[in-house]
Image: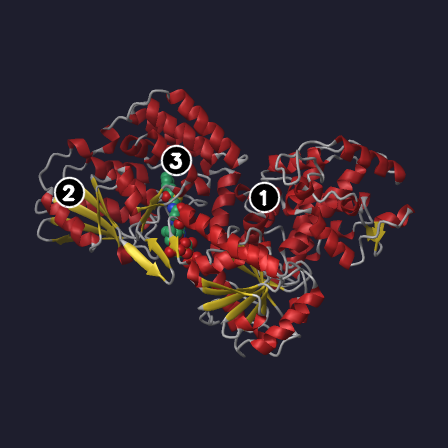
Amino acid sequence: MAQYRRVSGSVGLITLQNPPVNALSASVRQGIVDSVKRALGDQKVKSVVICGQNGVFCGGADIREFGRQMSGPPLVPMIHDIEAANKPVVAAIEGSALGGGLELALGCHYRISHSKAVVYHCFIMTMSDQAKLGLPEVTLGLLPAAGGTQRLPRLIGVPAALNLITTGRHVTAAEALQLGILDHVTEHNTVDVAVKFALSVTGESLDGRRISSFSCAPLSDLDSLFEEAMLKVRSAARGAIAPVACVQAVRAAATLPYAQGMEREKELMATLFHSGQARALQYFFFAQRAVGRWSTPSGARWDTSQPRPVRKAAVIGLGTMGRGITVALAQAGLSVVAVETHAKQLMEATKAVPSMLKRGAVRGGTTIEPDSITYSQNLQAVADVDLVIEAVFEDMALKEKVFQQLSIICKPDTLLCTNTSSLDVDHLASQTRHPELVVGMHFFAPAHVMKLLEVVYGRRSSPAAVATAMQLGKKMGKVSVAVGNCRGFAGNRMLKRYLEQAFFLLEEGATPELVDRALEEFGFPMGVFRMSDLSGLDVGWRVRKADGLADTSLTGTSARVRQGCRYSPLGDLLCEHGRFGQKTGRGWYQYDKPGGRVAKSDPWLHNFLDEYRARHGLVPRCIDQQEVLERCLFVLINEGFQILEEGIAAGPEDIDAIYVFGYGWPRHRGGPMFYADMVGLERVVERLERYHQAHPDVPYLQPSGLLRRLVANGSPPIHKWRNVIKNRNSQL
Ligand SMILES: CCC/C=C/C(=O)SCCNC(=O)CCNC(=O)[C@H](O)C(C)(C)COP(=O)([O-])OP(=O)([O-])OC[C@H]1O[C@@H](n2cnc3c(N)ncnc32)[C@H](O)[C@@H]1OP(=O)([O-])[O-]
């Protein structure tokens, strides 16, 4: 709803009231319509201010209403009536003006916002503008269809509007002022300033204040500007339709009169509104927030577990991961002790880390105090820290030793975290005096850039330990997802199945190019083989060797079988040929030099595959893209259901967040579990069964118990899966 009152004698003050972000629900829209009518009809009122309750102007349309039958007054005529008003209307923007919230402000005659100059946050100095403005609809699979695509280009010009609308990025009040979105910023109380301003413009002509009457600033080569914009969104969006529609809508603003532009905006929105991509992106919006409400099977929860304060942290091991973690901690304002026992590696890190920090500071517009990090070759340097993140080589014996030492050196209440990507967290905990203070913090490379953090709780991890790791992740700007302890945790455990299928497809006749093309057309930034070349084939090989799997001396049928299941030694054989991927200039593809980035098809690899198939009596067959997608994705999804069944992840949102933020799953497809829901659970079961019949030596193709149960329960929508997971006999 919206509250209306008269202030300072002649200003009608309309306050949006819909906590927490004053989203424009039906009742808020009705409240605005009623209040504007009242203000315009009251002769004592000479001007109007619109603001939001609790320091937030408006977070936009109420996303929860999108999937339902819309009721209440629509936004477009509501904003039109505000713009057409014969009394000045001023938007007082605190907190956020996003989506429909900014579109509402663009309908007002003046916009004033809050900007705070400088904030010192531990060692980092940031220019902090409290208000954030933007049109993020594209991130929800939509476009700003309450006039945003037509007013913004008229106000700030086509290139700047294209940038904001196609990326959905939020801008600070300072940038918004510079762009011309705002008329004024203040460090004082925004509503008070807006009321004073409203009094000062009473009676002034509004002719030059209605944005819909503006023309877009003329540009010399409009066609090439839009062609370029289209190419850019198509290459960045990888199949997402909303950015393309956004470009088309802005083009309408640049080429058509306002009324026709609005018609075009409406038409384009109609194509997006009920699309699967919009559903996926809106699901993902809420999924990201759901992962913050974590819980563990032992009863620890986000709202009852108190995190400990962490001011000083240590990182052990300054290889690629350790350096990235050090940077992420320093960027979060922590004091960091960075320990590396190898002198050469330490020396390299003392050069690399500051330059990574510098690059990050330039990108983020911040300055950083390099003294926040101290380097040491001696583990004793961690004696007084609150939390340690171990990032040494992925070797259990080495990690055991480190944990035993840490347990002696550190304060008794220091949290001990491991950045292992698959090893047993409970086993590491058992090496310490306080196993309840041990958790996994599984970062993804590069650790200072990638958004995902898997927080792995062990059997004995205390609620406070989990809460502390989750909160620290958030402080580092990560999406922290709490998962249980098992081999590979959630993400890598699912990935293993996906990789296996990709190898099997090669054995059966596919090429890396075919598999990668199918996955990239699906929306992954890189197919599985291009990705393996980038991350290095030797990483998995080392793990397989440690597990006793990578034995290429085996011949005959046993060469392709391990523990009674089908196994492909292709990756092991490539490594034996010294083909580790980009770093050696050869992998599943060839590169112009070691470290080269451009993957080229490699005739050697194709010959190698032919010979391999001939050696093992495998007759290559024609494999199409659909089979590639079904085999690779459905097996990964199936493992996801198994993970849910075992309680390793608490809900499908956790798995989807892990895959979107950590593994490049296209966001406009919502994540693997949402994708399964979209495809239809029955179909997933049917295809898995079919592939399992064809490949009985691959047990993971058998549909998981939970997947079958969901189908038996009538394939409920994804938001009801948790009920079935909780209640094994659920009939919903
Ligand atoms: C014709 C149509 C044209 C217009 C289209 C649009 O406007 S499309 C919209 C364009 N607008 C956007 O895309 C803006 C989306 N919102 C944001 O980006 C951020 O919420 C924020 C920056 C406003 C505040 O960040 P923060 O970290 O302070 O807070 P937080 O993020 O944790 O959210 C707190 C709670 O509020 C909930 N909620 C939030 N917004 C909405 C909403 N619009 N609706 C419903 N609910 C919303 C959120 O789910 C969470 O609920 P929970 O989990 O507690 O039950």
Image coordinates of residue 333 in percent, x first then y, are 42, 61
State the quadrant of the C terminus.
bottom right
Q: Amino acid at mark 3?
A: Asn
Is residue 568 placed above or below 156 in the rendered structure?
Answer: below
Q: Amino acid at mark 2?
A: Leu
Q: Which mark is residue 163?
A: 3
The residue that label 2 is drawn on is 40
Q: Nearer the viewer, residue 493 or 337?
A: 337
Q: Residues within 10 Å of mark 3 (few under 14, many from 20)?
A: few
Q: Is residue 443 visible?
A: no
Q: Earlier in the sequence, mark 1 or mark 3?
A: 3
**Disc 2 CB within 8 Å of nearest ligand 1 atom:** no
Q: CA distance from mark 1 to mark 3?
A: 31 Å
Q: Nearer the viewer, residue 237 or 331?
A: 331
The residue that label 1 is drawn on is 678
Q: Amino acid at mark 1?
A: Met
SS category of the residue bearing label 3:
helix
SS category of the residue bearing label 2:
helix
